[in-house]
Amino acid sequence: MKLRVFILAAAVLAILAPSCDKNKEKGSEAKKYAGIIFNEVAAHDETEEFATWVELYNTSSETISLEGLSFFITDSYFKGQKIGELSGSMAPGERKVVSTEDSSLATGFASNAAFTLVLGPSNSDPVATFEHKDDEPSLGYFASWQRIPDVTGEMRKLTYSSPGKENQLFDFSKTRRTAVWTWGSHLSDLIADDGAKMRELKRLGYDHILLNYAGYAKKNYHNQAVKFTKLADEIGLTVHVWLQAFYDGGWICPIDDEKKAYKEEVYERIRNEATEYLENWAVKGVHLDYIRFGGTASSHNWGVGENAVNSVNAVNRCCREIREICDGYDEGLITSAALMPEANSSQYYGQKPAEMAKYIHVLMPMIYRYGSYNMSDDTFKSNSNHFADQAAKGGGVSWTGIQTYDANTQGMTAEKMRRDIDLITETRSEGIVLFRYQLGTFPDITDLYK
């Protein structure tokens, strides 16, 4: 919790605030402002680097003067204290954001404690009121309470926010089916020069970024991750957190072979990580990498059938639990998973694409044709078709993962990369994913996947 450095300033404002008695003598003045509502509220006073802000909206058909209208807060520090005054006017359908960032709010308020925010000529004469109770969830860094549908709906918590813009749930169908895998170490390059590289990716037709979890988890990346998140929202890039399910510098087996049971702590870790990044970082999806065994899947099979403890069920369980978490938010959040490129290899990896696709929206088979696989054009395309067909059986879709470098790990030219992309567009794959950022020259693909 921040120290309330604004207490003295707020006390001065209190002297200027009209008393309740005077309001009673004059009668309610709130009706002059009828039509002004709270459309979005973000309380972040518990986290010093994030602003507290409020979005107002004029629902009326008339321009409304804001003169004499103020904000009042009641929480564990203040009891109906004035924390900001409005001026000017709002036209019909206009939005107005007031924030601690520009001091239009004199102090913030915290989402991890109870508070009541009032907009009105006085605290006892409200035009709009927003109340947060002690037993209700707090907000992540980029989360807010907002009306869904915009303006007309009830306030609800979302993990992402939209200050000054229409409130709406994420709609995956409105994005291009194009993505790029990026590491946490790429953040500094992505955000440099006001996100010049991010803007270029968007300009070339790439809509999704799969950012490795280290970009959020490592403290030395924190400030870069904050800036990256803000820029991605501004530019219109969709960000997914890239989790490493059964690998962390070494393979993590999710099955206890001695007990012939699942290691609950492994699944709990993955669930907790997914929840943490969804809550705090406004990501629109969870991407599962290393959602497999390292070639030893068949040695961890202790039965057959849907309820048996075996490698395929271990993989499917993780996919199911992550899907349940994402669906639980009811925000349009997306699941995706990286798959090995061999067909019918569940005995090695525990991956059965058709079964995974029951829970995973987008399968992303890593069909890396150069190097050890050395695929011909025909094999490259047939593998892409195989995963697309398997995904469809489970109710999902497949985006083909493509290398951006050759067998010598040299980045490819835009022309050569585009040739591989064009081959995939001839298959039943519904999108492409490039591995990786900072290797090769990405081609313009704005003519694809519109």
Image (cartoon, helix red, strand yellow):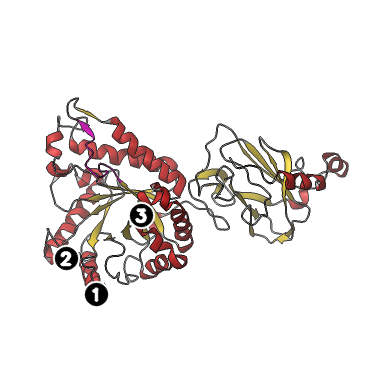
Numbered disc 3: secondary structure: helix
Q: Is residue 279 above or below residue 208?
A: above
Which residue is denoted by mark 1 in the rendering? Answer: 415
Which labelled disc corresponds to residue 59? none
Give the foreground label among 1 and 3. 3
Q: Name the residue under label 2.
A: 408
- Tell me the magenta residue range: 244-256
Q: Quadrant of residue 350?
A: top left
- Residue 354 in picture, x, y percent from top left: 21, 46
- Give the amino acid at mark 2: Asn
Q: Quadrant of residue 257?
A: top left
Under tag 2, what secondary structure?
A: loop
Q: How far apart are marks 2 and 3 (CA)?
A: 24 Å
Q: Which of marks 2 and 1 is in front?
A: 2
Instruction: Say few, some or many: other residues with alpha carbon within 10 Å of mark 1 (under 14 / 14 to 19 / 20 or more).
Output: few
Measuring from the top left, give residue 229's x and y in whole percent. 45, 55
- Residue 194 visible in the shown view: yes
Q: Give 352 or 367, whichever is nearer the viewer.
A: 367
Determine which of the numbered discs, if any, sits on residue 184 in the image.
3
